[in-house]
Amino acid sequence: MADNTSQSRRNTKGRQRNRGQQGRQRQFSEKAPAQRARRADPSRLTAFQILQAVSNDDAYANLVLPTRIRRNKLDRQDAAFATELTYGTLRNTGTYDAILAECVDRPVIKLDKPVLDALRLGTHQLLNMRVPAHAALDTTVALVRSEIGAGPSGLVNAVLRKVSQKSIEEWFDTLAPGDTDKDLSVRYAHPTWILRAIKQSMAYHGRNPADLPQVLAANNIAPELNLIALPGIGELGPVIDYGATASTLAPEAAVFAGGDAGRIPGVAEGTVRVQDIGSQLTARALVRARPVQSGETWLDMSAGPGGKAAVLASLAASQGATLVANDVSEHRTKLVQQALRVVDEDAWTTSVADGVQMGEDPDNAHRFDRILLDAPCTGLGALRRRPESRWRRTPQDLATLTKLQAQLLDAAVKMLKPGGLLAYVTCSPHIAETALQVTDVIKRNPDVRLLDSASTLQHSALEGEGGSVLARESVTSGEAESNMTQLWPDLHKTDAMFFAVLTH
């Protein structure tokens, strides 16, 4: 009897007929049992492994994904698929969890982590990739069978079928129909506290609040690779010949659409570096703020892993200055040394020290002509590059970070020569980490004053027919000679870097 029932649910090709929902005609499955995938394909397996590393080990996807791609021997097409699947899933985690919560009979947080990661991967394929629904379902269930076990595969199959019944826009209409902070949080995959911090920063810098959705959307666009030919050392021509496009914003910079960065001419040698153009501009701005006098001594207080230090050291070598590149971590200092290996060794030195303690050392009192303090921060300005950060960071992180930022600023003031220049930089738009830090350090140190940071940043950018291509009104609302600047991912296609120049 059971055999007859089983046969009646299969068509002539052996495909199983689904039981269907009430009021709907039963449909046959896309594949016969013998044709269904039993093992995870390499690209989806790679994405799953990265999500597990992020979930279990607090790993950063941009650091572990390239290694895993090589280890799993993915070809170029599979590597691109794995990359999009990984970053897209991480970026939209909050949105997908809100959708899954409507399709699971228990709180999402109570699902086993591997099962939840698999569900997120399947949801991204169903709603935001050009993957046929049957393929997304079949391959995700195969992944679960292979990597987790046969038991959870039925749950995953049932939940993803519910997800697939609506498009992403239909899910938004259900879960986020308005324009409240909660609605925007779901629609643009930003925790509400980060969304509010961005909104507050926009208001502080005079941006139209109606621009909030486009700022949030810009954080969800996978960034292109930004490159810099180190001043006086690297060559941009071969980079352009390789297929990159010269930057329209920064000198000696280029933008590359994708591929293995290590194959770009000059990258393996270290004369060309991968670095966000916003970071390039802030390092250049410290040097362009005032003519350099031969014999100046510069300090990069938190130099690891060495991106800005490489730019500063290259400029120091060509202008008769010397850079001290410091970091509190010995491991990160070794990365700095690796980054600086192509620069004349007479132009730089490294040190391993706590930046706050450096300020207490009498030998460092009023020692440096220029100081770059790229302070440890929440990294909310780099959500495009580290999408998992938005779900990992919490408001509680601010208390620890802002205290450290204030201590480092006070130490920098102690080490700055009278009349010297101090650039305070963070990769965050949060005003507690940016504008408030600057105003507070001035209150604590009455002899410290803020300079025209907007003009300084403009002078570090390329020149157009009417002057700098970096429009003043796009980086600051301050027309006064004392102002701070904020770069934006939607306006400048950079990370949301904050920059202010101080002196005393």
Image (cartoon, rainbow, N blue to C red):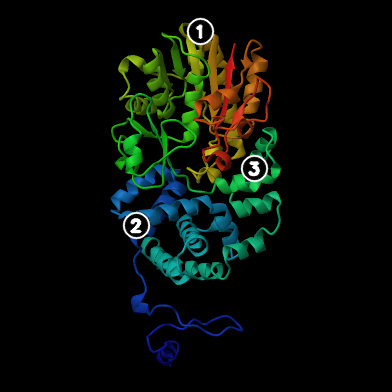
Q: Label 1 sits on what residue type? A: Ala
Q: The residue tagged with tag 2: helix, strand or loop?
A: helix
Q: In percent of the image, x 69 and y 41: which residue is there?
A: 208
Residue in the foreground of this view, choosing between 136 and 53: 136
Q: Label 2 sits on what residue type? A: Gln
Where on the picture, by quarter, is residue 394? top right
Residue at the spot of label 2? 77
Q: The C terminus lies in which quarter of the figure?
A: top right
Residue at the spot of label 3? 193
Q: Is residue 240 above or below residue 417?
A: below
Closer mark to the observer between disc 2 and disc 1: 2
Q: In the picture provided, is 179 more to the left or to the right than 341? A: right
Residue 433 visible, this orientation: no
Q: In percent of the image, x 37 and y 28: which residue is there?
A: 230
Categorize mark 3 by other alpha carbons within 10 Å: few (<14), some (14-19), many (20+): some
Q: CA distance from mark 2 to mark 3?
A: 37 Å
Residue in the foreground of this view, choosing between 467 and 482: 467
Categorize mark 2 by other alpha carbons within 10 Å: few (<14), some (14-19), many (20+): few
Residue 103 visible, this orientation: yes
Q: Earlier in the sequence, mark 1 or mark 3?
A: 3
Residue 423 is labelled as none
Q: The residue tagged with tag 1: helix, strand or loop?
A: loop
Q: Label 3 sits on what residue type? A: Trp
Q: Confirm or deny contact between disc 2 and disc 1 (CB under 8 A).
A: no
Residue at the spot of label 1? 365
Closer mark to the observer between disc 2 and disc 3: 2
